[in-house]
Image (cartoon, rainbow, N blue to C red):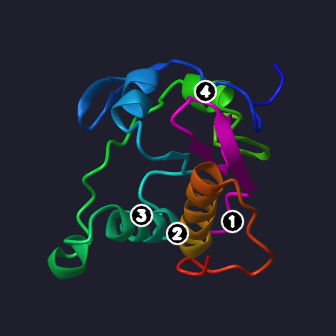
Amino acid sequence: MPGLTIGDTLPDLELETTHGKLQLHDFVANNSSSFTIIFSHPGDFTPVCTTELGMMAAYADIEAYNKGHRVNYPIAADPTRRIIKQLNMVDPDEKDSSGQQTPSRALHIVGPDKKIKLSFLYPASTGRNMDEVLRVVDSLQKAAQHKIATPANWKPGIL
């Protein structure tokens, strides 16, 4: 199966999440004025994964700075690894004890049109830079609103 990449339409998967059943296209449509970030983790609550979950919670909810980085966004389980395969989030070099491929540290940013606008693909051993994720979201939003391009090392707040 070819990998999901920039310009592709996000598959409309049904997921079981911490917020109940969720249809990906409905979730993106409910956030139609913004972009949606979908990211995978190689393991359940490993030290690197928990730092990423906490940072994303801090960015997703400003109250988290005062209340300990509550995770209030949906988290989906993928025990059969069906989701990571369909979203091109597999690390081909990492396998679990049963020989199954494990998730990479992948991240897709999806626009209101349900199209992939950006993809990061990190190996399981490397944590993502969440400041860069937010910088990219801000850049994508500015580009969509104002038809501009942001230069190398551009920082949010500078237009």
Amino acid carrying mark 3 in the image: Met
Please tell me which residue is depicted at 52% across the width and 69% down the height of the picture: 48
Q: Which residues are magenta?
A: 101-128
Camera sees residue 63: yes
Residue 125: mark in rendering: 1
Tell me: residue 75, above or below residue 128: above
**Cα separation between marks 4 and 2:** 26 Å
**Cα separation between marks 3 and 2:** 13 Å
Q: Secondary structure at mark 2?
A: helix
Please tell me which residue is depicted at 73% across the width and 58% down the height of the picture: 122
**Cα separation between marks 3 and 1:** 18 Å
Upstream in sequence: badge 1 or badge 4: 4
Left or right: 116 as drawn, with respect to 23: right
User: Residue 105: horizontal and vertical position, in percent?
Assistant: 64, 54
Q: Secondary structure at mark 3?
A: helix
Amino acid carrying mark 2 in the image: Val
Upstream in sequence: badge 4 or badge 2: 4
User: Residue 102: horizontal and vertical position, in percent?
Assistant: 65, 41
**Cα separation between marks 2 and 1:** 8 Å
Q: Secondary structure at mark 4?
A: loop
Amino acid carrying mark 4 in the image: Leu
Upstream in sequence: badge 3 or badge 1: 3
User: Residue 42: horizontal and vertical position, in percent?
Assistant: 58, 50
Is the residue under label 2 in contact with that under label 3 (CB below 8 Å)? Answer: no
